[in-house]
Image (tube, rainbow, N blue to C red):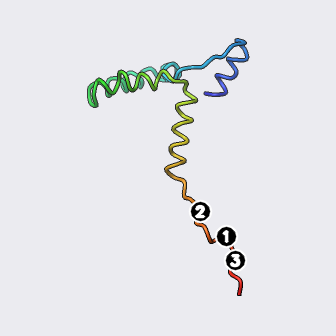
Amino acid sequence: MAVLDATRTVAASHLVLTPLRASWGAVSPHTLESFQHFMQTKINPLAWDPVAVTVLNLPGFAVFGVLAFLLYAIGHKPRRRGRDFAVEP
């Protein structure tokens, strides 16, 4: 998504940021409608608007960048200190 926005920005000579909703709607409008219906009926209407609508209006590369960072932070195992040194006899 970032590459697509960068290409469109260069071609248009001004900053172009594609919202996630536009990208999703272009690829699979049926699943976007299903997601909206699910959020409004099964979860809570407030979960769709303003929460999901706000996220879907953000640039797609930013949403996936934040998601990637969160998944990295959850799965990252910190190195134990003290194992990098050899024991001297």
Query: In the rendering, which numbered label is found on residue 79?
Result: 2
The amino acid type found where label 1 is placed reads Asp
Where does residue 78 sit, x and y in percent of width and height?
56, 59
Residue 81 sits in quarter: bottom right
Question: Which residue is the site of mark 1?
Answer: 84
Q: Is mark 2 on a helix, strand or loop?
A: loop
Q: Mark 1 packing: few (<14 Cα in 10 Å), some, or many (20+)?
A: few
- Which residue is more in the foreground, 42 or 75? 75
Q: Is mark 1 on a helix, strand or loop?
A: loop
Q: Distance between the residues labelled 1 and 2?
A: 9 Å
Q: Mark 3 packing: few (<14 Cα in 10 Å), some, or many (20+)?
A: few
Q: What element carries label 3?
A: loop
Q: How many labels does the image show?
A: 3
Residue 8 sits in quarter: top right
* Image quadrant containing the C terminus: bottom right
Residue visible at 54% across and 47% down in the picture: 72
Residue visible at 61% across and 27% down in the picture: 1
Residue 34 sits in quarter: top left
Question: Along the horizontal axis of the image, is 62 left or right of 11?
Answer: left
Upstream in sequence: badge 1 or badge 2: 2
Q: Is residue 41 above or below residue 68?
A: above
Where does residue 57 sit, x and y in percent of width and height?
48, 21
The amino acid type found where label 3 is placed reads Ala
Q: Mark 2 packing: few (<14 Cα in 10 Å), some, or many (20+)?
A: few
Q: Distance between the residues labelled 2 and 3?
A: 16 Å
- Which residue is more in the foreground, 42 or 80? 80
The amino acid type found where label 2 is placed reads Arg
Question: Which residue is the site of mark 3?
Answer: 86
